[in-house]
Image (cartoon, rainbow, N blue to C red):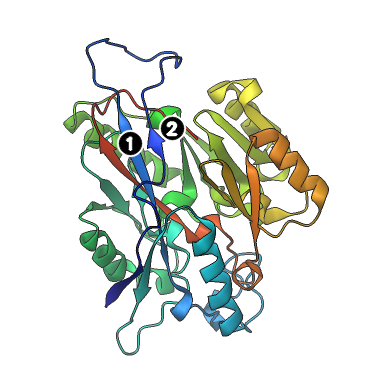
Amino acid sequence: MVSKTRKSLTNTAFDFKANPNRTNTKTNSNKIKQKQQKRFISISANTFEIIDTQIGQNPYASNLYINTKKAKEQHTNIEMAFSQMDVYKIFPKKGTCLPDIVFVANGGLSLPRLRNPLVILPWMKYQQRREELSYLKDIFHKMNVKTIQFPGNHDAPFEGQAELKWFCGGTKAIAGYGYRSTLKTFQILDSMLKKIYEENGLSAPKLLVLPIKSFDYYHLDIGMLEYADNKCIVHKDAFSPTSIRKIQNFLGPSNVHILETTDHFSLNSVVDGDNLIIHKLKNDDLKNNLELITGKKIIQVDTSEFEKSGGSVRCMVLDIFINKGNAEDTFVDY
């Protein structure tokens, strides 16, 4: 069973409007400007724990002890840091263990530019996460969001938003594979996207698919932060020099910033309007650097209990695109 525990604090998370300065975009003065809303959802921490089988599934999951009270307090503080957040509480069936469902960024991939909301459901690498699927479907059903199942298998798992970043109004995306998903995953996804967008009369997004270099960044959303429509920061150790050059060519060299730090979760953060919501950083120099690069106000929240299981802010927030107007002319106005 799933229940919604808190409504959004505001009616919209972001407004995405047609960008008159965006290049390589068809324009027509008679077209209605696109307004695209992006909503944030999260799942409360009432089922969060670390079980034996999770040890070693990522480089951070090595401690079975979780302070449950502290974790719930931390999650509430994350919710309150956002301008809006729809929070769902899961009541598992008897005998069902859902230790990771709080990391809802793995719960699906919402597709931008479509007239009607659509989420591609995941096929998780590990069994304890595949138990989440029926509860995720229930959430999207309550949101009136249509879903499509990713046809994954052990050779091609797919863990949703955590593995792909949208850019340029959803006309481009960067995906990372190697420790959860595989190259085959994104060959399948590319075919799915071409079919979905063609059926909606839209051009399919162009994918840049790259191997993740280090297990420390086992999901793309740990190794990369998108903070504007065509701008990102990447951890230097997350990708090879060749992959970083490909990212620079894909987005433009001046739009890609390279971060060298041992604070692995510093990019596992979320832009919310003028704010960048992020975990407790290791030092003020890093905070000042991120503020300088992004132009955002840094809002720090403690996610230490969740980091024991391999996740921080971005892992616990899923974006859902709600589109209005003309679906072809959109851009993400952070």
Using the image, tell me which numbered label, if any, was put on residue 265. none
Q: Residues within 10 Å of mark 2 (few under 14, many from 20)?
A: many
Q: Residues within 10 Å of mark 1 (few under 14, many from 20)?
A: many
Residue sitting nearer the eye, 232 or 9: 9
From the viewer's perspective, tell me whether residue 39 is left or right of residue 246. Answer: left
Callout 2 touching callout 1 (CB < 8 Å): yes
Using the image, tell me which numbered label, if any, was put on residue 36. 1
Dot 2 amino acid type: Val
Task: Indicate the position of residue 275 as horizontal and vertical percent values.
Answer: 58, 45
Look at mark 2 in the image and give the residue it sits on.
Answer: 332
Tell me which corner region of the image, top left, top right, bottom left or bottom right, holds residue 129: bottom left
Which residue is located at x 24 percent, y 67 percent? Answer: 138
Task: Note whether residue 212 is visible.
Answer: no
Q: Vertically, is 14 above or below 327? A: below
Residue sitting nearer the eye, 209 or 15: 15
* Cα separation between marks 2 and 1: 8 Å
Which residue is located at x 31 percent, y 28 percent? Answer: 204
Count of numbered circles on the image: 2
